[in-house]
């Protein structure tokens, strides 16, 4: 009896401490007198709005937009977050006020893996500009606009289609093949080589990347409450994630970088690794570029350059299976423009508006990263009349643009024709931002578009796709992780 009373008293005391601790912390997050801070929904003590965003966060953020407007506040744990919605508001922040809203917040997970020393999560400033310029230069010199680059993708398309043909129309999950193919394009740019799909080392890296992304999703709570990494289950996941990133992915990249150092010739740059090594040895980059930056930049290329493209291809194949009328129109256009006797090329793209519109609609209706990579304003700013204190965590809700009935008729309907004019040609799409916008627009946008077109047209040129007999239609909502990925599904591919 005494023990029960003691436990009850302890529970009450803990509850009181938590309540008043949360109250004090919340008061510290209030603005200064006279500030007009964005409104927002009430949240839980300590947890803030996390319970409401545990699933389908992009849908919840958009629902709150209808209640609180295009600029509102939430809390993720104890972190004050401003969510910006709608095309005009996003343009105001990321384009017209780019110097104020283009930085990145400090996150525990990315900070402990030197993410700020690369490009994607680097703070806005001169170091970021220098590294981004180097990355774009490498993409141009060893990828975009080069005949060899298109040939590399076409060769990979052949390998991918051969692997699909080997399934002989039997049901299979195409997820792994798509990731292998897309990752090989990054390997061609970065290392001047590709890997066979059954190469043990390559398979291990692909499996490792899948596990890294899976663990990153489960460990994101550590960004909010770093102390929970010491708890048994989360601590175990965090340790595994650290080991995979440090001793796995980074070691793989470091080995390749080390090999390149021994054969490096500044007068004969072979790939992105050579380009990064050249810049590292450039006196102008001292203090901006180091050996660590080389593998951080390459990690950015692999993570950002493969996951979103592979996920979009998975979505595109799923949509054309669900909408067989769209699949037939894409195949008719491929047969009319390309035929069956040669592989697709980029020169075909201007003559294939419906195929292009199908890919655009895929990225609209299932935006790869629905609320973009987080931003941060480095100075006090205003947005739509509200005061935004410096160093506020900013979520950019791209989903709110792509699913807004004011921008798109019946936005939940998959309809490629919304990107076509009366003559069936592509028309400008003002409210289309799958790669975000402003200074932090995805640096791999053109690379992604090139890969998507060539892989998608090659797959539809060679095969017809359907769900296996008796299979239920997959859940088309998707699952939010690093990207908004489709659920796991099987398909049957039969040669046309």
Image (spheres, rainbow, N blue to C red):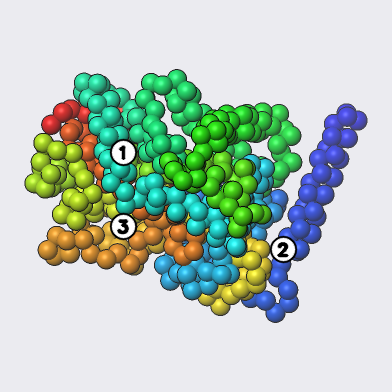
Dot 1: element: helix
Marks 2 and 1 sit apart, C-alpha to C-alpha, by 52 Å
Depth check: 158 or 437 in front?
158
Tell me if 126 is positioned left or right of 356 in this view: right
Residue that mark 3 sits on:
411
Q: Which quarter of the figure is the N terminus placed in?
A: top right
Q: Are marks 2 and 1 in contact (CB under 8 Å)?
A: no
Where residue 45 appears, as percent x and y from the top left, is: 70, 52
| Sequence-first tag of 2 and 3 | 2
Check if mark 3's residue and mark 1's residue have beta carbons within 8 Å.
no
Number of the front mark, 3 or 1: 1
Q: Is residue 252 visible?
A: yes
Specify whether 65 is left or right of 248: left
Q: Position of residue 181 (x, y in %)?
A: 35, 34
Q: Which residue is mark 2?
A: 29
| Separation (CA) of disc 2 from disc 3 | 37 Å
Q: Residue at x 66, y 46 (%)?
A: 111
């Amino acid at each position: 009896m005494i023990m029960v009373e003691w436990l009850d008293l302890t529970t009450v005391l803990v509850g009181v401490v938590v309540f008043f601790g949360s109250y004090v912390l919340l008061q510290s997050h209030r603005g200064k007198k006279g500030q007009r801070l964005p409104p927002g929904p009430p949240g839980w003590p300590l947890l803030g709005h996390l319970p409401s965003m545990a699933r389908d966060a992009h849908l919840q953020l958009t629902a709150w937009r209808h209640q609180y407007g295009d600029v509102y506040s939430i809390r993720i744990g104890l972190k004050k977050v401003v969510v910006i919605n709608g095309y005009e508001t996003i343009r105001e922040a990321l384009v017209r006020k780019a110097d104020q809203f283009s930085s990145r917040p400090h996150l525990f997970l990315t900070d402990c893996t030197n993410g700020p020393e690369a490009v994607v999560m680097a703070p806005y400033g001169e170091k970021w500009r220098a590294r981004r310029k180097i990355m774009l230069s490498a993409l141009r010199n060893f990828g975009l606009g080069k005949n060899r680059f298109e040939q590399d993708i076409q060769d990979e398309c052949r390998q991918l289609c051969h692997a699909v043909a080997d399934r002989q129309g039997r049901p299979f999950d195409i997820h792994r093949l798509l990731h292998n193919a897309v990752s090989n394009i990054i390997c061609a740019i970065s290392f001047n080589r590709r890997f066979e799909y059954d190469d043990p080392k390559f398979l291990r890296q692909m499996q490792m990347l899948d596990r890294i992304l899976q663990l990153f999703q489960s460990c994101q709570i550590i960004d909010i409450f770093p102390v929970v990494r010491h708890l048994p289950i989360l601590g175990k996941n965090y340790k595994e994630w650290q080991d995979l990133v440090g001793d796995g992915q980074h070691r793989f990249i470091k080995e390749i970088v080390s090999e390149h150092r021994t054969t490096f010739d500044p007068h004969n740059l072979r790939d992105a690794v050579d380009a990064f090594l050249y810049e590292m040895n450039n006196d102008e980059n001292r203090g901006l570029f180091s050996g660590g930056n080389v593998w951080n930049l390459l990690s950015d290329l692999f993570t950002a350059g493969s996951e979103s493209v592979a996920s979009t291809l998975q979505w595109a194949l799923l949509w054309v299976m669900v909408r067989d009328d769209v699949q037939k129109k894409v195949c008719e256009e491929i047969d009319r423009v390309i035929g069956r006797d040669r592989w697709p090329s980029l020169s075909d793209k201007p003559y294939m508006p419906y195929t292009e519109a199908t890919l655009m609609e895929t990225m609209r209706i299932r935006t790869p990263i629905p609320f973009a990579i987080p931003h941060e304003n480095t100075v006090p700013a205003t947005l739509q009349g509200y005061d935004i204190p410096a160093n506020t965590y900013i979520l950019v809700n791209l989903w709110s643009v792509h699913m807004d009935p004011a921008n798109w008729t019946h936005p939940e309907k998959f309809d490629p024709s919304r990107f076509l004019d009366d003559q069936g040609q592509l028309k400008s799409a003002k409210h289309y931002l799958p790669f975000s916008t402003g200074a932090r627009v995805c640096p791999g946008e053109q690379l992604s578009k090139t890969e998507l077109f060539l892989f998608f047209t090659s797959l539809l040129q060679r095969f017809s796709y359907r769900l296996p007999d008796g299979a239920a239609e997959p859940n088309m909502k998707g699952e939010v992780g690093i990207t908004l990925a489709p659920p796991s599904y099987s398909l049957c591919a039969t040669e046309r």
